[in-house]
Amino acid sequence: MVAVLGGTGRTGRPLVAELLRRRHKVVVLARDPAKLGMVRDEVQVITGDSRDEAALTELVSGTDAVVSTLGPVRGQGLINQDAAKALIFVMRRAGVRRYVGVTGAGIDVPGDQKAIFDKVLSNLIQFVSRKAAMDRTAEYQEWVDSDLEWTLVRAPRLRDGPPTHAVEPDAHRSAPSPFLRRSDLAEFLVDVLEQGLYVRQAPLVGAKAVSDGPVPK
Ligand SMILES: NC(=O)c1ccc[n+]([C@@H]2O[C@H](COP(=O)([O-])OP(=O)(O)OC[C@H]3O[C@@H](n4cnc5c(N)ncnc54)[C@H](OP(=O)(O)O)[C@@H]3O)[C@@H](O)[C@H]2O)c1
């Protein structure tokens, strides 16, 4: 059984669909289960907020792993460090050890060999979106300080559209493209989970081709 956070979001919906396609049993924590759409009846749903310890406890109970595409949404402030703290606490208590999540390519981790352009971009993101970048860095640090088997996938600018199945990950080197489709990210997250990839690492990931075609409306 796989627990999902952020399953109502733009990456979360294809993630849940991909987990179901690969025959996983799925439990989703959602504030508004109606947003799950068609898969609503194919998954177990816990209604609640990702910062609520009781809801998280119910979510992770009896699961083998947690996959999260949780991110800040308009009108509620930053959430990722708080959610990570709460989640690590309940996962350790429940004996659930595997976590696969998403963060931004703008955060830096020790050992990085980012291309010059990406180094500049990361510095710019950390300057312009200072608080959001600090929250994501603090989220990363929560996982590093835990004894769990985490992976935080560092995604570049996300786009919608059907999967291209062409994703290039690397633990520390920049991806060839500064873009990635959410459907490809969803597939990659399930690959990471199923194949036990990048444990206690934060791989950079992007589309293989530099041009990802026209941006869908
Ligand atoms: N946008 C980009 O270009 C980009 C680039 C790099 C990395 N990322 C990161 O990639 C991840 C996926 O991005 P996305 O664009 O697919 O995200 P998204 O569509 O904005 O989805 C965010 C999800 O988080 C959920 N959420 C937020 N606060 C919550 C709370 N307090 N309790 C429960 N659920 C909560 C939302 O639930 P509701 O439906 O209830 O609001 C939604 O399911 C995020 O971590 C994002 O920060 C994004």
Image (cartoon, helix red, strand yellow):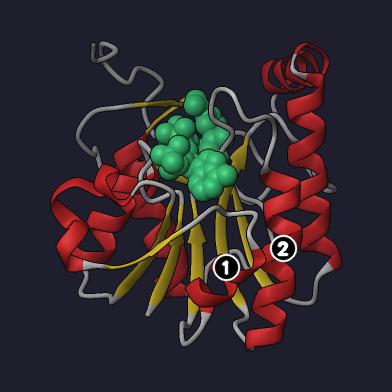
Residue 103 relative to residue 12: left or right: right
- Looking at the picture, tell me which residue is in the foreground, 98 or 54: 54
For label 1, the residue is 56
Q: State the image quarter where residue 84 is shown.
A: bottom right
Residue at 36% across / 70% down in the picture? Answer: 27
Q: State the image quarter where residue 97 is shown.
A: bottom right
Dot 1 crowding, Cα within 10 Å, few <14, some 14–19, many 20+: many
Residue at 69% across / 29% down in the picture? Answer: 106
Q: What element carries label 2?
A: helix
**Total number of numbered labels?**
2
Three-letter amino acid code of the residue under disc 1: Leu
Cβ of disc 1 within 8 Å of ligand 1? no
Residue at 59% across / 23% down in the picture? Answer: 75
Residue 99 relative to residue 121: left or right: left
The reply to whether the C-beta atoms of the residues labelled 2 and 1 are less than 8 Å apart is: yes
**Residue 51, position as x, y percentages in the image:** 65, 54
**Residue 92, position as x, y percentages in the image:** 71, 81
Residue 169 relative to residue 20: left or right: right
Dot 2 crowding, Cα within 10 Å, few <14, some 14–19, many 20+: some
Label placed on residue 86: 2
Residue 108 is at least partly visible in this image? no
Q: Is mark 1 on a helix, strand or loop?
A: helix
Mark 2 to mark 1: distance in Å? 8 Å
Residue at 76% across / 15% down in the picture? Answer: 120
The numbered mark, 2 or 1, whose residue comes first in the sequence reads 1
Three-letter amino acid code of the residue under disc 2: Ala
104 shown above or below 13: above
**Residue 102, position as x, y percentages in the image:** 56, 47
**Residue 152, position as x, y percentages in the image:** 62, 53
Residue 158 is at least partly visible in this image? yes
Q: Can you say which quadrant of the picture contains the N terminus? A: bottom left
